[in-house]
Amino acid sequence: MTTDYTSMWKDLGLDLTAHDALLGVLGQAYGDIYQSQKNRPSGMGYFDFVVSEVHGLRVKELMDAKAQGRKVIGSYCVFVPEEITLAVEAIHVGLCSGADFAMDEVEKYLPRNTCALIKSAMGFKLAKVCPYLECADMVVGENTCDGKKKAYEVMGSMMDNLYVMDLPQVKSSEGKALLKAEFLRYKDAAETLTGKTIDVTALKQGIALVNNKRKAMARLATLRHNASAPISGLDSLLANQIFFFDDPVRFTDSVNALCDELEKRIEKNVSVADENTPRILISGCPMAVPNWKLPAIVESSGAVIVGEESCVGERGCRNLVDDSADDVDGLIDALVDRYLAIDCAIFTPNTERTDHIKEMAQASKADGVIQYTLNFCQPYAMETMPIENELEATGLPTLRIETDYSQEDMGQLQTRVEAFVELLK
Amino acid sequence: MTTDYTSMWKDLGLDLTAHDALLGVLGQAYGDIYQSQKNRPSGMGYFDFVVSEVHGLRVKELMDAKAQGRKVIGSYCVFVPEEITLAVEAIHVGLCSGADFAMDEVEKYLPRNTCALIKSAMGFKLAKVCPYLECADMVVGENTCDGKKKAYEVMGSMMDNLYVMDLPQVKSSEGKALLKAEFLRYKDAAETLTGKTIDVTALKQGIALVNNKRKAMARLATLRHNASAPISGLDSLLANQIFFFDDPVRFTDSVNALCDELEKRIEKNVSVADENTPRILISGCPMAVPNWKLPAIVESSGAVIVGEESCVGERGCRNLVDDSADDVDGLIDALVDRYLAIDCAIFTPNTERTDHIKEMAQASKADGVIQYTLNFCQPYAMETMPIENELEATGLPTLRIETDYSQEDMGQLQTRVEAFVELLK
């Protein structure tokens, strides 16, 4: 980082010693995993900079915005509509949940058999090491899986600004009505927080900003379909991760600039991988910063990742919101339609997810699919076996990986992934 | 059993060898655990008979009823309204999910980290050893926890008569509307299955039958509050288990006859436990037949169980349905009110459950509470620590037990329970 942010972190109430340790580990991991890659697009320089300033410059921007009266809303899930947040001129940020922190403390509140992502979210709170969480004016939880639903009950006692959004389990007319009621309730809460009222213009503007981000990500996803592999899976994942907390306009511009470069790379056949490198689609649980464990193993095992069927990936950012309605209610309906199309494993039935994995595998010319599940994530774990059967019936080899954020199983995972990659050659 | 039911089981498609093995184990366990108890009320003779005929006479009754054109509806959860089933003159039976069966087969379909109850339900299907499941005309699943919600997707491919009921996660107005819509959908499904139409009289009759069962169980629960401990927890649990599959009128009469006897026992100070025997409330996951593992350990460790805060227990059978409405819609509303009051851990928030545990502990004069959780049951596991904190703050000692249906940890559990009982003396 170019600036000393210590006083800002101190003002936010961070535990400076623990936070320094976190940044040290993060920097080390980033150097080892990212900066050791060869032939990266120069457009990744922007994303490298964002990571180098991950708890610095971006947090300072939020603090400056707060000083000017804007509000910050933090969330843990792709179901919280950023469009509404932007319509009240607030800033929407994804919150830290990608690394183990204060696990001993966490296990005083949550069962050991809880997924790493949920434990991490609580660990960052208990250890006071997430500046985004500490500067948020409102934190939005959501009733997705049982684990998160019940963990928010506990986290509610640790912060006074937690708001929980309910979600349906079935895409029925009642389920849709519930989601609409919850989006309207969130709109009210955002309006109350900011003192602003959402009109058509403001909501259309919010929708346009997020649609543009999504369009840029779709462009990146499509460029990765090219047989020449113009960018690594690790770098693409990073863009997907930064999607959640960077300034939306700057982020969109940076992804589009990267895509311009990738188009040129494709023309010139510039690649990050040799011809005939096995192409792998990753499918399953989200990978929040700095959870680069599995992709690092895959890409150091001689394969290239060509897509992420994940909340931090195509499941989270595909599909645009129809902005043609001319009143707020109509735009809210359009938001509901877009978000209800997310094929998250919390829904039942969720056969459209299998269809989407097949489509992604075909479009990206994947040679195999790795199903990635966090230990104790029941919804995704439960979908793993039926999906494996369906994919293998189409001749697509699959590998199931169940892990957490620890480094203990690295050797074992490396061995299993290498064997899978060998199989695809 | 007094009769040879082999041909009936064969006609139902049961695997006779596996089924014989199951009945052998069940009979052995029942003998060891139940019939070794001292000073049992003679009214338990009826329940002993029901267990001795568990897959025999009761199944024959169902087959005879089917031969006369009645339908059988099976369910796995207290949220499925038996009142509606009875209103179409169908028979409502709880389905087998209390013992490990065909676990190797089950783990080809479900993750190993799935709770024993869900694995058991699938195991009974795969092994073809549950005559209730095989004779059911319709099987009703429900979107309660993530595990069940997703397991029904898989089980749907194993049977052609699975119907899944959606459930809310929050007791909001939308949640209530969802439950009402689902009860109306279930009413339609039951009407279609049977060709009958539910009118006020039929629904009131269904409500009366189930209310009477619940009243009898409430009477039993209240008699157990008496300091003299007129009945064991094991015997009371058995009544709670048989609640789910016996004929409702005969069951109600039998429980009331047992209660008459218990009243006399109380007058005469006839007890199953010495004075000053520690009194324990069990709270948590349901115990389906033949899951008697923990209560057997508790009561062989010198304590008496005075209540079950469980679906198979007070959580499942308390609260009556108001039958005062004079139209079907009003009665459905009353059903919704009664079922939405269930304080299952799938709801968020669910603070009323903690309140109810405190009330039960006080009413039953419990000296301590054992929180019983099936491994990998996230909703109940997640509530365990907050409840422990609340109970211990009121001076009530608690013990957390997390286990499954295997016998492997019996010794360890016995040691922990004995130490807890010693603490309460």
Image (tube, coloured by chain):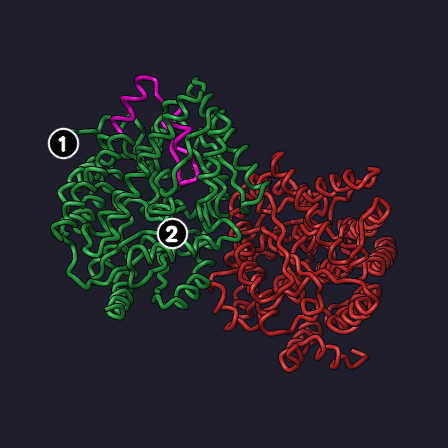
Chain colours: A green, B red
Depth order, front residue of A389/B382:
A389
Nearer the camera: disc 2 or disc 1: 2
Start-end of magenta stretch: A59-87
Relative vertical location of residue A257 with respect to residue B221 in this rendering, above or below: above
* Residue, disc 1: A2
Of residues B383 and B400, the one nearer the viewer is: B383
Corner quadrant of residue A190: top left
Find residue A406 and name its label.
Answer: none
Residue B80, placed above or below residue A2: below
Provide the residue designation for mark 2: A285
Q: Determine the residue positioned at 60% across, 64% down.
A: B121
* The C terminus of chain B lies in quadrant: bottom right
For numbered disc 2, what is the local secondary structure? loop
Give the amino acid type for the residue marked by disc 2 in the picture: Cys
**Residue shown at the point (72%, 47%) measured from the top left:** B364
Percent x, y of residue A8 = 25, 26
Quarter of the view holding residue A204: top left
Whether residue A78 sits left or right of residue B406 in the image: it is left
Residue B188 screen position, x and y as percent: 72, 50
Q: Verify CB contact (< 8 Å) between mark 2 and mark 1.
A: no
Relative to B303, does residue B358 appear above or below in the rendering?
above
- Work out how far the residue at label 2 is from the one at label 1, CA to CA, in angstroms: 34 Å
Q: Quadrant of the N terminus of chain B?
A: bottom right
Q: Identify the mark nearer the N-term, 2 or 1.
A: 1
Q: Secondary structure at mark 1?
A: loop
- Look at the image and say whether residue A244 sits in the magenta stretch: no
Q: Position of residue A357 (x, y in %)?
A: 38, 56
**Chain of the residue under the numbered disc 1 shown in the image:** A
Q: Please tell me how crowded label 1 is: few (under 14), some (14-19), or many (20+) other residues with Cα within 10 Å.
A: few
